[in-house]
Amino acid sequence: MRLILLGPPGAGKGTQAQKLVDQHNLVQLSTGDMLRAAVKAETPIGLRAKALMDAGELVPDEVVVQIVSERLDEPDCGNGFILDGFPRTVPQAEALDALLERKRLQLDVVIELVVDEDALLDRVKKRAAESGDNVRSDDNADALKKRLDVYRAQTAPLAQFYREKGLLKQVNGMAAIEEVSSEIDRIFVEVG
Ligand code: AMP
């Protein structure tokens, strides 16, 4: 199974992706995690990305497309993967189409976690409070607001992009974690 999890910051993409990894033996490809690792390791990409990430802005399309393209070539992706946090712009989605075609791979489904934006700020604040010393440098009110604005402007149009391709399935991301994951399981059965 090759899928994209779509949804704003705090929608629960990471949580659901982790469940899918455990249950379906898929690999989670989170561009946010990969970029945070690059920042920590102070690689050239990390050094370029840090300020943008801290401000809640997107890093340039070509940077993330390159990271994803290389990651998809690793053998553990052979059984399928979950793209979490990528693509985030229409040009990234177009680049993904092109690179999947080159690699002779097809997407099975795009699952959008639909959430009420007002509730997200609370969720992300809670996540920041619970993560103690591991708090993400972009889990603060200003950066979150920016990330939501960026999502609305640049990422939300991807729902229509994938609807037109017949790949979009929407799930109520405000439901309890277990309910969301049963909905996703139902979609897996449907998509096969
Ligand atoms: P995330 O963990 O998915 O919320 O991503 C954290 C931050 O990493 C984002 O706010 C962006 O600055 C950056 N980032 C992650 N994925 C992408 C992407 N696909 N395109 C551009 N920037 C990204």
Image (cartoon, rainbow, N blue to C red):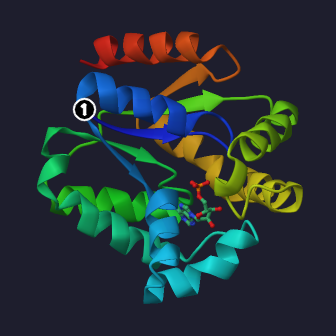
> In the rendered view, would you say 62 is above or below 123?
below
Query: Where residue 167 appears, x then y in whole percent?
Result: 40, 32
Q: Is residue 110 visible?
A: no
Corner quadrant of residue 112: top right
Residue in the image at 38% along x and 65% along y: 95
Q: Quadrant of the C terminus?
A: top left
Q: Is residue 42 visible?
A: yes
Secondary element under disc 1, as helix, strand or loop, is: loop
Residue identifier under label 1 = 1
Few, some or many C-alpha atoms within 10 Å of disc 1 (few <14, some 14-19, many ≥20)?
some
> In the rendered view, would you say 69 is above or below 112?
below
Query: Where residue 177 appears, x then y in whole percent?
Result: 59, 18
Asked if residue 133 lies left or right of residue 73, the reply is: right
Query: Where residue 143 appears, x then y in whole percent?
Result: 80, 62
Query: Where residue 16 appears, x then y in whole percent?
Result: 49, 29
> In the rendered view, would you say 57 is above or below 176?
below
